[in-house]
Amino acid sequence: MKGRNFKGVWIPKGLYLADGLTWTQKLILLEVDSFSANDLPCFVSNDHLSTFTKASVSSIEKSISKLVQYGYLERTRERVNGKSTRFLRVNRSKFCDWETVKDAESNPQNLRTTYTNIPKPVKKPKKERTPVSITVCIEAFEGVGSNALEAQKFYDYYAANGWTQGRNKPIVDWRAAARNWVRRAAEYDTKNQANGFNAAKIDRNRLANYIEGGDT
């Protein structure tokens, strides 16, 4: 909201004279509309509305529920970055004299908005069943600390098997399969090194007997 040339709000006659609404409820409608008049979502918290109206948070929640119940306020929820976020919007049709702000299209910076503070959803990378080329495959392997040789082995193996694994089950995400391949290759190398030649394990007498007479 910093840097916005906010000039105030206009109270419609219908809202000002509404007998069925408390001033806390009227202030909530005005505050929400000051954010959403430019047709952008308002997701101010109950804490903000409590500070603005000087009413308790529980009173704000009750007021919002009443406004929604009476049709003065629209309340929806959407998931943003995996978190459920509440959006509010005033139902202007309840007040015939509540006109749309004329500045909304020509000079939107004169309107308050919380839109710029909404966290942008993190797009999950699209899963790919097969790599588009061996070059892409090599880049993926090198990106996780492997090399082009392992990438070629991986590519040739799964290409020959129709990019299936297990019981001919199609691979859902080849990059995940590639990471598993790299991990298994590292584990295999470690195991071979452990079971490989180790001079400390050689019994010289048994080796000499075997060379001379074939005895173990």
Image (tube, rainbow, N blue to C red):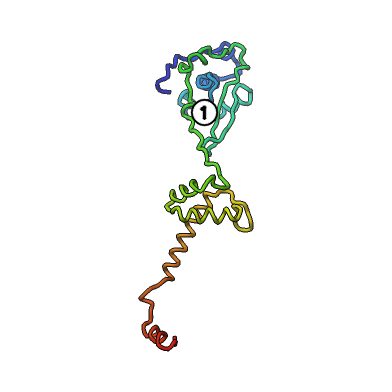
- Nearest the eye: 50 or 140: 140
**How would you rate the neighbour count of disc 1 (Cα within 10 Å): few for under 14, some for 14-19, many for 20 or more?**
many
Which residue lies at the image location 49% right of the left edge and 15% below the top edge? 9
- Nearest the eye: 167 or 162: 162
Quadrant in which residue 189 is drawn: bottom left
Residue 4 lies left or right of residue 157; in this view the side is left
Which residue lies at the image location 63% right of the left edge and 58% below the top edge? 167
Q: Position of residue 87 (x, y in %)?
A: 55, 28
Q: Position of residue 204 (x, y in %)?
A: 36, 82
What is the three-letter code of the residue carrying label 1?
Phe
Which residue lies at the image location 52% right of the left edge and 46% below the top edge? 133
Quadrant in which residue 26 is drawn: top right
Which residue lies at the image location 61% right of the left edge and 58% below the top edge? 166
Vertically, is 183 above or below 123? Answer: below
Position of the C terminus, as image quadrant, is bottom left
Position of the N terminus, as image quadrant, is top left
Vertically, is 210 above or below 14? Answer: below
- How many labels sit on residues? 1
Vertically, is 9 above or below 132? Answer: above
Q: Position of residue 96 (x, y in %)?
A: 62, 12
Circle 1 — which element? loop
* Residue at numbered disc 1: 43
- Nearest the eye: 140 or 25: 140
Q: Position of residue 197 (x, y in %)?
A: 40, 72
